[in-house]
Image: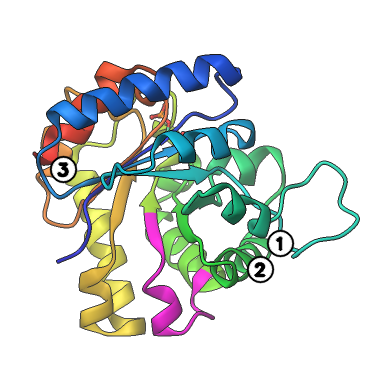
Amino acid sequence: MRKKIVAGNWKMNMDYNEGLALFSEILNMIKDEVTGQQQAVVCSPFIHLHSLAQLAKGYDKVAIGAQNAHQNESGAFTGETSAKMIKSTGAAYVILGHSERRQYFGENNELLAKKTDTVLANGLKPIFCIGETLEEREAEKHFDVIKTQLAEGLYHLSAEQFGQVVIAYEPVWAIGTGKTATSDQAQEIHAFIRAELTAKYGLEVADDTTILYGGSANPKNAPELFAQPDIDGGLIGGASLKSRDFLDIVKVFN
Ligand code: PEP
């Protein structure tokens, strides 16, 4: 049975103290309210990682993630953070290829393939984001875009390595816009992704892969999205900054 995951992406929000306060609220609620087998992942800015990982000790339903990692192991890359550093904080996941990184920092599939290797080599799990822009959807290129992002970013991995990867389908037109993909639109792409993975890695690996939906998910629309057979949870931006909303989304799987 593949893992159900709800991951929060705080983006560049929350100073150190605000982040600790929000995370403490989340932990308290999880302790009292989460009864299912799902995993909550909180992907914070780097400055919070170590403290959050310390607070999360003993909570098996909560893991910590970063939002980016450098492709090199170490060296003269001023201002960057390596996968080894992230691992040393106690974090377990790293978001890679978020559309904001692709758009504002020029990250392409080739670079993301390297980042994926470094993240995996350091014992971290990538949450690998893929998704089409509005123009690409309107031009009916969305399936091709997804196929290329998967192939160029991930298909150099062995089946064993791929087993560590979580996929997040995030239509760019739905991120932070309040426009959610309908559950049918999301399910159509998730089923397509799983079929592509089946062709590349076989049925067992594809069946075990957690595929998250991201894009204006909230406590109201999450139940219908997560009821789809190929949607295994969510990557949540805005709603992850409110403890009640985030928990209500995590609890969809209770
Ligand atoms: C995201 O940033 O990954 C995201 C899905 O954002 P939002 O939920 O705010 O659309």
Specify whether 196 is left or right of 136. Answer: left
Examine the image and state in which quarter residue 188 appears: bottom left
Q: Residue at x 46, y 84 (%)?
A: 158
Q: The magenta stretch spans which residues?
A: 154-167
In magenta segment, residue 145: no
Label 1, label 2: how far apart the Cα atoms are: 6 Å
Residue toward you, 236 or 139: 236
Q: Residue at x 40, y 82 (%)?
A: 160
Q: Residues within 10 Å of mark 3 (few under 14, many from 20)?
A: many
In contact (CB < 8 Å): disc 3 and disc 1: no
Q: Is residue 165 visible?
A: yes
Q: Amino acid at mark 1?
A: Gln
Q: Which circle's residue, 3 or 1, is located before the other in the chain?
A: 1
Q: Secondary structure at mark 3?
A: helix
The yes-or-no answer for disc 1 within 8 Å of ligand 1 is: no
Q: Residue at x 21, y 81 (%)?
A: 203
Q: Amino acid at mark 2?
A: Lys
Residue behind mark 1: 71
Q: Which mark is residue 114?
A: 2
Residue behind mark 3: 226
